[in-house]
Amino acid sequence: MALLVQKFGGTSLADVERIQAVARRIAACRQEGHELVIVVSAMGHTTDELTALARAISVQPHQREMDMLLATGEQVSIALLSMALQELGVPAVSMTGTQVGIITESAHGRARILEVRTERLRRLLEDGQVVVVAGFQGTSSGACGTPEITTLGRGGSDTSAVALAAALGADACEIYTDVPGVLTTDPRKVSDAQLMESVSCDEMLELASLGAAVLHPRAVEIARNYGVPLVVRSSWSDAPGTRLTSGHPRACGPEGLELGKPVDGAELELHQAVLALTDVPDRPGVAAQLFEALGSADLNVDLIVQASQDGGSNDIAFTLAEADLERASEVCRQVLAAMGAEAAVLSGEADMAKISISGAGILGRPGVAARLFDTLARLGINLRLIATSEVKVSCVVAGREGSKALRATAEAFELQERQVRHNPLGCQLADPAVRGVALDRDQIQVTVRHVPDQPGSAAAVCRTLAEATISVDAIVQSERTHTMGQQLSRDMSFVLKREDLRRAEAALAPLLLQWPEACVEEGSAIARVSAVGAGMPCRPGTAARMFRAIAEAGINIELIATSEIRTSCVVPDSDGVRALQAVHAAFALGGVMQHRAEGSEAPQTDEQA
């Protein structure tokens, strides 16, 4: 007998017939002897409908009242599902987030969970009840300690389910949806997308944050932090679905279930080198040609950044082992000569170090990267390269500064000695180079021109955006420098959500007044195509395959940013779907499979709230 938390989303509960089908599934599972906690979303498109009602009355409805309104959707679901179970002879009781003991911070519309008080829930389970819980909601202490209903934001029912599983120490958390599990990409855009039997939480965090909507990133973050066994399955079949792998289970601490330390590790990798190519021709196939040649020479490249185009040319920089610098330089010279890039300039720097922080808590917390940059700036350490992802932030600095940077980073993020690593081992060859690919079209590229090339400049930009609660990704510093008097400057590009553009410009305006000639330049509409795989670091040529696939589709890459397990390419928005299809095919991720559940529309997230 196992204790299971099962979550059913909006399309699984869209009407009476589907509610009854879910009830029969739950009854069969209980018949096998399992203890069950069921978390549900609002029926069908209820959340959208309630939101539309509010917008019809008020252009900007008060967030507290929105929480009061939206929380009613899940209350309908829990009552009806409990009734359906009782009709089948299954003892069941419905509970709101408040009743089940989900305690959150006081942030209406986007609250994070502090703790789950499980005493009442455990008593009901001991009495043989199936407990049906309203996802997406909790309670906080308002003024004078008065309880206030809060909601967790979009995808909150996933978050509720995994949080309950973590607090209860459940044997597994099962997310039931209308697709068979986690697929290699969006099947609405790539018809032969395949089911993944397993995926690591780190890989899933990257994919979820890039638009793989089957799981919400916050739910994956909790599963990773507390070692919750997590499975994504179809509501309409008994297929095993996709299993998410994480570390060993651990108890929830007193620091807040979702508000613990965002960083749980730091590492320093010495004996690194940086190779930079400036004034490289801006045309499809250039990046592919370069990194194919490096891969053919069995040279393993780590971080890659390509800055935004300037005057019909691009800058490309990458890191690799210091011992490979000379061989890589010769390969680059041969490639530049072959493409007739007479104006291009090649430069290399040895004795560099890579300092990195990691942790699922980095996700959605823009202040974490800024804190790292600030820490290094206070020591007078300049950042040579920056690479960011949802679970890791890396900076390349001078080798002589490496040990000092690691000590300061560990202190800034309150890390213990066991959480700090020197020259970590690479990936395991058993891990695939690419597990899945994702497309995010809700992005825009922004370039800050003429940022002073001195310690603290990147930190100032990122800190300013973080203080405005704006998250950025794919942070790239140009290799090309500009001269302003005696001060050198560089351009700094990053990607953010389109809806945050105006807020970002307003937030940066006071800072840029301090820097002569600095300005914000808005790029055209973009799409970001990303390949994710834990085996990427130890397979030379993986990035080159991605670049070649995009080039052969006749698509130009405007920006490249990588982390250890992700390579992202920014392309014109109109080319996004074709680029996704090309990359998916290049890594042979497709196959023949029936994705569509009986009676459902095109596969999509089951989540409404």
Image: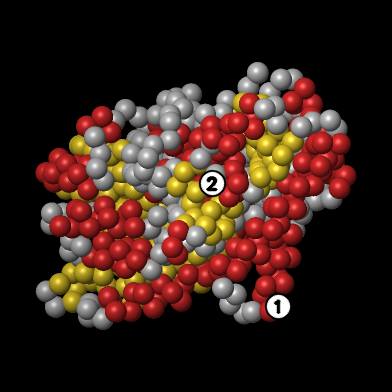
| Residue 423 appearing in the image | no
Judge whether 449 appears above or below 38 on screen: below
Q: Residue at x 22, y 77 (%)?
A: 515
Depth check: give the residue in front, 575 or 409.
409
Q: Residue at x 19, y 53 (%)?
A: 376
Q: Disc 2 marks which amino acid?
A: Ile
Rate crowding at label 2 as few (under 14), some (14 to 19) or many (20 or more) other CA atoms within 10 Å.
many
Left or right of 4 on screen, residue 223: left
Disc 1 target residue: 56
Q: Residue at x 72, y 39 (%)?
A: 93
Judge whether 497 appears above or below 248 on screen: below
Rate crowding at label 1 as few (under 14), some (14 to 19) or many (20 or more) other CA atoms within 10 Å.
few
Q: Disc 1 marks which amino acid?
A: Ala
- Alpha carbon distance from label 2 to label 1: 31 Å
Q: Please identify, in this view, whether the residue under mark 2 or under mark 1 is nearer the observer.
A: 2
Q: Can you give x and y, in whole percent of width and height, for residue 148 in the image? A: 53, 59
- Name which of mark 2 and mark 1 comes first in the sequence: 1
Q: Can you give x and y, in whole percent of width and height, for residue 514 in the image? A: 22, 78
Q: Secondary structure at mark 2?
A: strand
Disc 2 target residue: 102
Q: Can you give x and y, in whole percent of width and height, for residue 467 in the image? A: 34, 66
Depth check: give the residue in front, 531 or 66.
66
Quadrant in which residue 477 is drawn: bottom left
Give the quarter of the figure containing the C terminus. Answer: bottom right
Left or right of 516 on screen, residue 357: right
